[in-house]
């Protein structure tokens, strides 16, 4: 197995509320993941375009800027189809038909353990698929 095969992908956290963003970053870093964070979809697009180690997008929906989290998720799905997408919101409810294929929705407040368990599951699935 190559060293790259055992390296976890980084998580890009997109949240416009600074305290919520810091909490999410701390939660995901404490679980052993490298993180990048952005206060808007516009900033997130710049970050994902310049870092090839991002494998998971964790985004809020309701954000200022040129697009909300759902549009960001669609943009990422189109440009980086291998990136896994987790979407959260405390304001907006979302149906499966509104979300990019393969993404998952979390209502805020979400359980930290649920997010971490799902991140680990996504990584385990990728590792299994890369060995096949």
Image: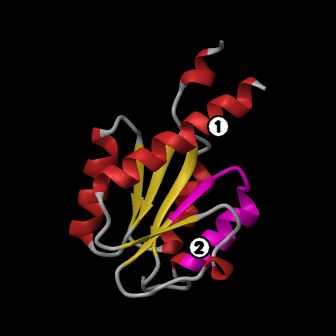
Query: Which residue in the rendered view is the most extreme toward the top?
Result: 1
Q: Which residues are magenta?
A: 70-86
How busy is the neighbourhood of tag 1: few (under 14 within 10 Å), some, or many (20 plus)? some
Badge number at residue 72: 2
Label 2 and label 1: CA atoms lie apart by 22 Å
Instruction: Reply yes or no: does residue 105 show up in magenta.
Output: no
Name which of mark 2 and mark 1 comes first in the sequence.
2
**Residue displayed at 65% across by 14% down:** 2
Q: Secondary structure at mark 2?
A: helix
**Residue displayed at 64% across by 37% down:** 126
In the figure, 71 relative to 103: above or below?
below
How busy is the neighbourhood of tag 2: few (under 14 within 10 Å), some, or many (20 plus)? many
Rendering coords of residue 11 (x, y %): 47, 49
Rendering coords of residue 72 (x, y %): 59, 73
Instruction: Reply yes or no: does residue 81 show up in magenta.
Output: yes
Rendering coords of residue 122 (x, y %): 56, 44
Instruction: Verify CB contact (< 8 Å) between mark 2 and mark 1.
Output: no
Please give the residue where the numbered disc 1 appears in the rendered image: 126
Q: Nearer the viewer, residue 95 or 87?
A: 95
Q: Say which quadrant the N terminus sits in.
A: top right
């Amino acid at each position: 197995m190559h060293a790259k095969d055992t390296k976890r992908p980084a998580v890009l956290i997109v949240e416009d509320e600074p305290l919520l963003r810091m909490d999410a970053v701390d939660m995901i870093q404490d679980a052993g993941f490298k993180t990048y964070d952005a206060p808007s979809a516009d900033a997130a697009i710049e970050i994902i375009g310049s870092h090839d180690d991002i494998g998971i997008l964790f985004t809020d929906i309701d954000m200022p800027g040129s697009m909300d989290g759902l549009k960001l998720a669609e943009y990422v799905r189109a440009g980086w189809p291998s990136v896994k997408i987790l979407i959260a919101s405390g304001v907006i409810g979302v149906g499966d038909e509104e979300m990019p294929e393969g993404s998952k929705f979390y209502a805020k407040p979400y359980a930290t353990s649920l997010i971490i368990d799902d991140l680990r599951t996504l990584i385990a699935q990728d590792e299994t698929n890369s060995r096949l």
